[in-house]
Structures are given as C-alpha cells and as structure tokens.
Amino acid sequence: MTIRTLALLSAATVALAACGHKTDTATMTNSDTDTTMTTTTTTNMGMANGMDANMVAPMPSASQTFVNTAAASDAFEIAAAKLALDQSKSASVKSFANQMIKAHTGSTEKLKTVTAGLTPPLTPDATLTPDQQSMLDGLKGKSGSDFDTAYAASQVAAHEAALAGLKNYAATGDVPQLKDFANGLIPTVTAHLNMAKGLK
C-alpha cells in the first residue's frame, strides 16, 4: 500500500466521522508485509437515533408540575416532622409534628388515588426542591430551642408556599379532579399555617 493511498483513506475517514455518518470498519491488507490496518469511525449517537443534538426534553405539563409540587411538599413535611420528634424538647412542637405526619401521609395517599384515576394517569414525583432540601439539611444540625425556632420558621415558609400553589392550581388548573383536590386541601393547609405561626 502506498503512502498516498493511506493518506486518502485517513482523509475520507475523518470526513465521514465529522459528518456524523456511520461507516463500517474498513480493513486493508498490505500483501507485501502481511500487515493489516483497520480504521473504525465513530457514530454520532444523536444523528444515528434520528434525534437532533439540540433537542431538549419536553417540559412537564402544569398538572404534572402541580402533582410533583404537592408530593414534594408532603415529603418535606413528613421528613421535617420526623426530625422534630427526634430533636425537639418541646411538647407543642412534637404534637404539631405528629399532626403533620398524619395529615401529610393522608394527603399523599389521596394524591396518589386521584392521579391514578386520571386518563392518562399522572405519577407524583416527591423529589424535594433544592430549597426544601436546604431547609431540611439546616434542621439536621440543630437541637433544643434552636431546632424549635428553625422548625417553626420552616413550617411557616413551607405552608405559605403550599397554600399559594394550591390556590393557584385551584384557580387556573386544567384537570377538574386535581382542582377539587387543591380546593379540598386549602382549609387544611391554612389551619396548618396558622398553627405553625403559633409554635413556640
């Protein structure tokens, strides 16, 4: 094989790889020296699968976003309440925490029932938001009265956010069953917010 042939083969391989086209492995044998040269090009995965490399995953619908927000709110409340049971010395804080576990566990079950009955069904994602995770992490490092103060503040903030989300979806949501769910929770979350404001 001549140097010119090798140069042409290399240039063709580079050109094809740059275009994102799949090429089969090319094998050439030099009969004079019984050596084999193999050249393989890579495949542009996005193009091979018929996908545009600039394609972005679709945004979740407003209803899916609401469902995820409600699920994450419940998960945060339950996790924070469990910390309160372990780290607080206050009877009133522990009583509130027990109520939060009971109420938000019930809310989660109701949400799952409602979303499973939709067509198509929605699956709640209870992954905490960065703010929720940050609040939870902050609580983990506290105890006694410092914990109680931080827990009360986190509960006010969390219930204000939850109430705003429920009111917004109840007014503008597009799934009647979820609007009913939101409307049904507004009085409960309002009561929880008032209780949180009264925590000492």
Image (cartoon, rainbow, N blue to C red):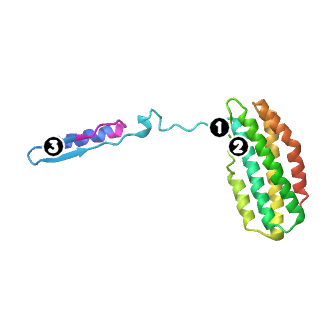
Q: Which residue is mark 1?
A: 60
Q: Nearer the viewer, mark 1 or mark 3?
A: 3
Question: Relative to 2, is 90 on the left or the right?
Answer: right
Q: Earlier in the sequence, mark 1 or mark 3?
A: 3
Report the quarter where the N terminus lies.
top left
Magenta stretch, main secondary structure class: loop
For residue 200, say whether it is visible.
Answer: no
Depth check: 94 or 3 in front?
94
Callout 3: helix, strand or loop? strand
Residue type highlighted by circle 3: Thr
Q: Nearer the viewer, mark 1 or mark 2?
A: 2
Q: Which residue is mark 2?
A: 68
Report the Cα–Cα distance between label 1 and label 2. Answer: 10 Å
Residue type highlighted by circle 2: Asn
User: Residue at the location (26% across, 38% down)?
Assistant: 12
Q: Earlier in the sequence, mark 1 or mark 2?
A: 1
Contact flag, marks 1 and 3 (Cβ < 8 Å): no
Q: Which residues are magenta?
A: 17-26
Report the Cα–Cα distance between label 1 and label 3. Answer: 55 Å
